[in-house]
Image: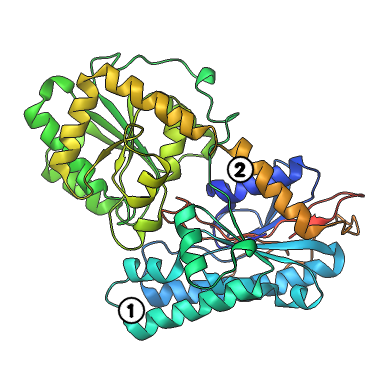
Amino acid sequence: MLAHAYYEEDSRVRRQAESLVSAGRPVDVFALRRVGDAPSDVIAGVQLSRLPVSRHQGAGLATYLREYAEFFGRAAIALARAHRRRRYALVQVHTLPDFLVFAALPLRMARVPVLLDLHEAMPAFFKSRFPRSWGALAVRALEIQETLATSFADAVVTVNDALADRLVRRGVRPEKLTVIVNGPVRDLFAPELHAPRSFMADGRLRLVYAGALTPIYELDVVLRAVATLWQTRPALRPELDIYGRGDSEPGLRKLAAQLRIEDHVRFNGRIPLEAVPGAIAMADIGLAPTRRDPFTDFSLSSKLLEYAAMDKPVVASRLATLQRYFPSGTVITYEPGNPDDLARVLGAAADDPGLRRRTLQATRERLSALDWDAQSAKYVALVERLAGGRLSSGDSAPIAAEAPSRNGADPGVAQAADATAGPGSDASVEHATAGRSSQRSEVA
């Protein structure tokens, strides 16, 4: 798998890779490398190769493009070198960027199937992230590269039905397309593994947000809603725990101070995926706040699914795709961008145990078709169909390292994953997977 992301932080890439390992497929992932990380590792049976490229979250457009280009080049070289020894049965590429799929060109020419996993709509993402940099011609160019990428791949996966419908409208054949929702792993997001907390057990309304701190997620609206609750409903004593990192954090800290709620908001930083369920278990309500724009109209927050799996009531932005999966009466929603409405909804949820009980039960019922147990079976079946009976060499020796990067980082290993975080998946990553087996072929 190829993913422009930090493997440990990307739940979608990890779930897919570990599902393949559990099914007997060796998996190699080529991904980004943080400063201080080892060039290679084995995590839950997945062979991880970290290429010497780091993410520059919150940087300008030129930095994003340079980072994409550097990862593309290193991933293409690493993948081609690895294939000479590993003989991959399949290459899966996670977006963003869409054009990363062409890093698999040498393997595609050798008739290795290519699976493209579109985490986001790249044209809409860049228009939302860099509104001043993208005119009609730039958006058209992104649409063309998206079309070329989907045409190049043997099969295309995406994260929800809204994105799938958009791809069909843009010319992708329905039979080439599969929706794999980024649902929670029930063995991990298992409330019975954590001490139960009754609602407002300590007399405080404890709110939790676990995800990226970027402009796409309207945490500024959440802070203003918390401030409103302290002014209008002080008996609720609302407290907010934020888990994650991103370029919005400095501004959010400043806003919390301006609103005089800094003593009631905790920025806990990024925590490992394995620690997220425990953080959710200590809260009363999970928040999935997403700013509404043409990009997020295609998004379904994986945070929402994780809160529900942990038996927590969910309050989320009222977006089109969310309402498609969770109709009225399931998730509690508020008007995006409206802190007064969010404060009203949170107060109503705190006051009405019947509302919390009814919506949580309805959300659980919808979740049963969206959790990773259901999605994993569909995903593994797709990989098996594409990979067929291809066998690997079974050679599990380390792959030849790349030359050091210009900044002197340690050389990277030859298998990679690549993706970019965004609302469609909440942790978008692009990746390639492969592993060791004397009978099953490797996935790259």
Residue 341 disc label: none
Q: Mark 1 and 2 residues: CB-CB less than 8 Å, in contact?
A: no
Mark 2 sits on what residue? 375
Badge 1 or badge 2: first in the primary sequence: 1
Dot 2 alpha-carbon crowd within 10 angstroms: few under 14, some 14 to 19, many 20 or more: many
- Please tell me whether mark 2 sits on a helix, a strand or a loop: helix
Mark 1 sits on what residue? 134
* Above/below status of 212 relative to 367: below
- Residue visible at 20% across and 50% down? 337
| Kind of residue at disc 1 | Trp
* Above/below status of 312 relative to 85: above
x and y percent of residue 274 in the render? 54, 34
Image quadrant where residue 230 sits? top left
Is any atom of residue 123 visible in this view? Answer: yes
Residue 273 lies left or right of residue 92; in this view the side is: left
- Please tell me whether mark 1 sits on a helix, a strand or a loop: loop
Q: How is the model colour-coded?
A: rainbow
x and y percent of residue 397 in the render? 85, 57
x and y percent of residue 316 in the render? 31, 40
Please identify the quadrant where the C terminus is shown.
bottom right
How far apart marks 1 and 2 lie (CA) works out to 35 Å
Most foreground residue, 29 or 38: 29
Image quadrant where residue 417 sits? bottom right
| Kind of residue at disc 2 | Gln
Dot 1 alpha-carbon crowd within 10 angstroms: few under 14, some 14 to 19, many 20 or more: some
Please identify the quadrant where the N terminus is shown.
bottom right
Farthest residue to the left: give it: 232
- Residue visible at 41% across and 82% down? 140
